[in-house]
Image (spheres, helix red, strand yellow):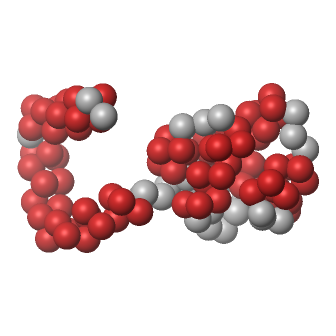
Amino acid sequence: MNTAFGKLIRDRRKDKGYSQRELAALINIDFTYLSKLENNRAEYAPKEDVIRNLARYLDLDPEELIFLAGRVPHREEALLSQHYKSMPMLFRRMRESPEFAREIFQAAQEAGSSR
């Protein structure tokens, strides 16, 4: 999990005026787990539904929060599982050709902004 994840949820929780116990109760997790998340001591990243609930109560972008937590959103998991055999080739091409990698990232950004 990215250390920015814990800092972001802690800072935003405080900005919103929630105690750890209050926010944990809202998203149906134990406050000790929320504390571990905020302090980057959790042994595992939270499930996607917990992350989405955090995003909802903290007014954060759920996709960004999922990424910071080190998770792959469920809808992308399906796509990855369909095309997993092609991934090593894609990563190899991106590593070998920075220009190809830039084109892929640019196309992804353009596709994301058109949604």
Whether residue 105 is visible: no
- The relative height of residue 58 versus residue 47 in the rendered view (above or below) is above
Residue drawn at x 14%, y 71% as measured from the top left: 85
Residue drawn at x 19%, y 70% as measured from the top left: 82
Q: Name the side, left or right, on which 43 lies relative to 88.
A: right
Residue drawn at x 59%, y 61% as measured from the top left: 49
Give the image quarter of residue 17.
top right
Give the image quarter of residue 110.
top left
Residue 103 locus on image (x, y percent): 13, 33
Q: Quadrant of the C terminus?
A: top left
- Viewer-proximal residue among 8 and 96: 8
Whether residue 30 is visible: yes
- The relative height of residue 12 versus residue 70 in the rendered view (above or below) is above
Q: Quadrant of the N terminus?
A: bottom right
- Viewer-proximal residue among 50 and 11: 50
Residue 99 locus on image (x, y percent): 10, 32
Determine the residue located farthest toward the front in the rendered image. 115
Image label count? 0
Residue 83 locus on image (x, y percent): 17, 66
Residue drawn at x 54%, y 37% as measured from the top left: 61
Q: Name the side, left or right, on which 29 lies relative to 97.
A: right
